[in-house]
């Protein structure tokens, strides 16, 4: 796996490099701002870029903007956003910006080393890894007058499963989490796919589309 | 023994050189200030003479009305040039408070211009500067020319016609004269530097007094004012008063003793006593004036003291001269008139017709400073948020990263690993609390993308349907306005989620001229209490920005509409 890091805080950047090296993942390049991201992505052709949201010079959403531009220039690039705050709008923008894995995790999740490394690998492989807080923020209770919301077609259990899919959990992890059998999870997921009118195709791709549908629905609501 | 100059602990030569360099730089600075002042003084003279004569001669016709505006604008333009020049000299920006002229119609504008005290202070500056600036600037330039002549004279004295002299006293048509002139150059240079300093300081103080905010305005933080505070601290007239009085008594006593010596019979020491009485009285009056600290009564007493002493001395002189025509009546009358005028000037703020003007000025000033304070507060809060993000939060994240790595290495010691995991959870909780705190100051997306994006993001997180109407193309209002608008919307949506029975909420954000209008409408059962604590807090927030907040039933009496209007002129 080829991985690059864009983080302006040296403490965190070095920490990440060391942590990933211990897990056998080599960081091929790192940068400190949005222009740097575009440069190293162009030069090193990584599978995944770990990007901070606030970067110089504006210290606002520079990282998200640069990541969107990088995905436009290099389709298929996986982007894992690490941020100190949850922002569903940025997640949706990234998910909608084309192929390739997308992750949005709070920075402190890095401390859960095993889960974090799994998330990095999943995003590099084209999957999703959304922070549970992002999912929780979007998984709002249904409104009394909510109209033609695609999520309303799902049963509460299916919504729960979809949320876990969005976090990037595998079927067996979802089964463990909900204390049901793997077969039951598969049944829920195929129900979700058909209720969201997702075309037949690769399971991974359909999972991404389902998450995207979920995010869109949340956005439009 | 303590050193005479405790600061001179370094090499004295070096210290001297540094001080000489500083003085040289200051002299160049002063020269530049006075030179520019010379140029603007000529400009000022042309502008004020032209402005006043044209306006007065046109005043009989209707065209005199626009001429007032044109003249005031020209005065202000020249005054602004001098403000910039004086700001460099004072080392602090010099900003006057011009009355706002919101009414664009001609007559109200003319009336506002004429009643704005700053218009008249500008004119006063132009008149004063066209004399003082011209004189000081000319003296400064002449100092430089003279210095150049003194230094270079040994090279070209032979070219001078026979009988030439300098300042009418120094013959410089010969080699000795030229050499003498050259020797005189250093003391002349020192004198010039001191003179430049004095003139530049004087002119800058005059500029600060007339071109800065009025003295009673709390925003008057000009360099000149600081300087006057410093000088008051340096010379304390009251401390020297006993010495002065004692010395005076001693002199009178000595004179009396001298008089007692045989040979004189006219009691001349009375004149010495009268003269010293006057100096001591003036000294006491100065101390009184200083300690009055602007209180009119103290100042009037100080002036009255001098006046009474003068009248007393006149009466004494009259009596000593053997009476006759009671001429001291006239100085007494004149001094009474002066005292009356002084009282009138000092108490002018209490006169009914100026009181209103003072209040208007005060309101202008308070409006400006309140807004300034709020802007500073908003900027400060955002800075704190950024510092938290880059500082404490980043360190805690780094900590939890390190503990995660430690945990990985502790697979064979499950008890210790559990402790580390617990510690990491604590760090995570601290990060979460800091995040909530930062979010309460201003949500990151509000800072990053503005109001509409922030409300859209908020809409994603609430359990009711929220539609947002507004353009992202809005010019970004000041942070303080933006944050207030965001919290009005957030609180209103929260209220709607609680009380509107799940009814959808419609948020509209629009900018109409210099007013940001936000409206949050739901179609729930209505009945919001405008005096409720949440709404009262919002109202305070909005009113502090001179905005309005209205809460009432929606169209056809259904639902609740919260409407806030926030001035956002930048």
Image (tube, coloured by chain):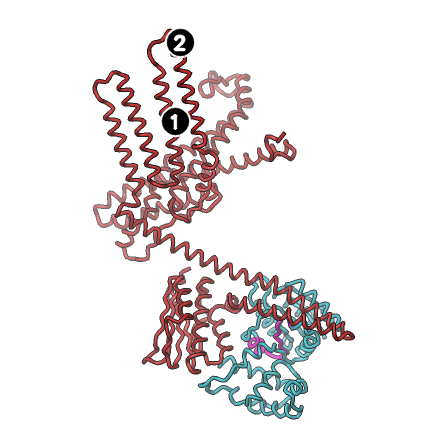
Chain colours: A cyan, B red
Q: Quadrant of the C terminus of chain B?
A: bottom left
Q: Residue A142 in the image: x percent, y percent?
A: 50, 84
- Left or right relative to B334: residue A117: right
> To which chain does the residue with label 1 belong?
B
Q: Is residue A71 magenta?
A: no
- Of B457 and B44, nearer the camera is B457
Residue farthest toward the right in the current orientation of the protein: B412
- Of B52 and A17, nearer the camera is A17
Q: What secondary structure is found at the residue carrying circle 1?
A: helix
The residue tagged 1 is B280
- Of B211 and B397, nearer the camera is B397
Specify start and end residues of the magenta stretch as a single range.
Answer: A91-108
Disc 1 crowd rating (10 Å Cα; few below 14, some 14-19, many 20+) is many
Q: Quadrant of the N terminus of chain B?
A: top right
- Position above or below: B48 against B249: below
Q: What secondary structure is found at the residue carrying circle 2?
A: loop
> To which chain does the residue with label 2 belong?
B
Numbered circle sitting on residue B261: 2
Does any portion of residue B161 appear in the rendered image? yes
Q: Quadrant of residue B271?
A: top left
Q: Nearer the viewer, mark 1 or mark 2?
A: 2
Q: Residue A65 in the image: x percent, y percent?
A: 57, 70
Does any portion of residue A24 appear in the rendered image? no
- Position above or below: B13 against A31: above
Q: Quadrant of residue A23?
A: bottom right
- Of B39 and B229, nearer the camera is B229
- Position above or below: B491 against B464: above
């Amino acid at each position: 796996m080829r991985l690059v890091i864009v983080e302006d805080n040296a403490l965190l950047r070095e920490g990440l490099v060391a942590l990933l090296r211990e897990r056998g993942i080599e960081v091929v390049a790192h940068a400190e701002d949005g222009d740097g991201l575009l440069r190293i992505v162009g030069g090193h052709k990584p599978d995944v870029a770990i990007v901070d949201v606030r970067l110089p010079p504006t210290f606002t959403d520079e990282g998200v903007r640069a990541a969107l531009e990088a995905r436009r220039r290099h389709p298929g690039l996986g982007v894992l956003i690490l941020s100190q705050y949850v922002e569903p709008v940025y997640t949706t923008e990234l998910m909608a910006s084309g192929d390739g894995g997308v992750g949005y995790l709070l920075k402190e999740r890095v401390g859960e080393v095993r889960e974090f490394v799994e998330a990095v690998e999943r995003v590099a492989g084209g999957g999703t890894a959304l922070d549970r807080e992002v999912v929780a923020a979007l998984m709002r209770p249904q409104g009394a007058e909510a109209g033609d919301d695609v999520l309303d077609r799902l049963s509460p259990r299916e919504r729960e499963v979809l949320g876990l899919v969005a976090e990037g959990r595998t079927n067996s992890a979802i089964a463990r989490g909900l204390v049901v059998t793997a077969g039951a999870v598969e049944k829920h997921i195929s129900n979700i796919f058909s209720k969201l009118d997702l075309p037949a195709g690769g399971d991974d791709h359909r999972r991404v589309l389902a998450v995207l549908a979920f995010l869109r629905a949340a956005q439009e609501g | 023994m303590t050193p005479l100059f405790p600061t001179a602990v370094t090499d004295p030569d070096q210290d001297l050189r540094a001080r000489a360099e500083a003085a040289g730089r200051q002299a160049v600075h002063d020269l530049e200030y006075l030179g520019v002042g010379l140029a603007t003084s000529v400009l000022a003279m042309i502008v004020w003479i032209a402005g006043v004569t044209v306006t007065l001669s046109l005043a009989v016709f209707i065209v005199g009305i626009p001429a007032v505006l044109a003249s005031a604008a020209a005065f202000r333009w020249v005054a602004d040039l001098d403000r910039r020049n004086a700001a460099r000299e004072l080392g602090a920006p010099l900003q006057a408070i011009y009355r706002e002229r919101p009414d664009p119609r001609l007559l109200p504008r003319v009336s506002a211009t004429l009643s704005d005290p700053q218009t008249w202070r500008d004119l006063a500056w132009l008149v004063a500067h066209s004399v003082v600036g011209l004189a000081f600037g000319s003296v400064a330039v002449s100092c430089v020319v003279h210095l150049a002549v003194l230094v270079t004279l040994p090279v070209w004295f032979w070219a001078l016609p026979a009988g030439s002299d300098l300042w009418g006293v120094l013959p410089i048509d010969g080699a000795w004269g030229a050499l003498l002139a050259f020797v005189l150059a250093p003391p002349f240079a020192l004198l010039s530097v001191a003179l430049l300093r004095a003139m530049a300081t004087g002119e800058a103080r005059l500029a600060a007094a007339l071109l800065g905010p009025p003295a009673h305005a709390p925003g008057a933080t000009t360099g000149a004012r600081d300087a006057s505070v410093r000088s008051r601290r340096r010379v304390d007239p009251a401390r020297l008063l006993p010495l002065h009085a004692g010395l005076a008594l001693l002199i009178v006593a000595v004179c009396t003793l001298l008089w007692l010596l045989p040979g004189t019979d006219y009691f001349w020491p009375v004149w010495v006593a009268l003269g010293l009485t006057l100096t001591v009285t003036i000294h006491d009056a100065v101390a009184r004036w200083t300690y009055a600290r602007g209180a009119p009564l103290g100042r009037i007493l100080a002036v009255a003291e001098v006046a009474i002493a003068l009248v007393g001395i006149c009466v004494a002189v009259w009596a000593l001269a053997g009476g006759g025509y009671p001429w001291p009546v006239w100085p007494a009358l004149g001094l009474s008139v002066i005292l009356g005028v002084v009282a009138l000037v000092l108490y002018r703020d209490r006169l009914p017709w100026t009181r209103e003007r003072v209040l208007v000025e005060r309101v202008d000033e308070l409006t400006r400073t309140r807004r300034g304070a709020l802007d500073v507060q908003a900027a400060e809060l955002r800075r704190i948020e950024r510092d938290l993000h880059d500082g404490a939060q980043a360190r805690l994240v780094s900590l939890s990263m390190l503990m995660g790595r430690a945990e990985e290495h502790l697979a064979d010691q499950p008890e210790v690993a559990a402790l580390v995991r617990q510690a990491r959870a604590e760090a995570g909780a601290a990060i979460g609390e800091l995040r909530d705190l930062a979010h309460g100051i201003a949500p990151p997306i509000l800072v990053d993308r503005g109001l509409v994006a922030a409300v859209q993001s908020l809409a994603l997180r609430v359990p009711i349907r929220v539609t947002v109407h507004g353009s992202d193309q809005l010019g970004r209002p000041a942070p303080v306005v933006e944050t207030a608008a965001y919290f009005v919307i957030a609180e209103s949506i929260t209220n709607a989620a609680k009380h509107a029975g799940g009814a959808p909420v419609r948020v509209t954000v629009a900018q109409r001229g210099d007013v940001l209008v936000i409206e949050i409408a739901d179609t729930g059962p209505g009945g919001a209490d405008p005096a409720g604590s949440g709404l009262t807090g919002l109202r305070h927030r909005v009113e502090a920005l001179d905005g309005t907040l209205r809460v009432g039933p929606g169209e056809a009496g259904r639902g609740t509409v919260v409407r806030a209007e926030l001035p956002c002129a930048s």
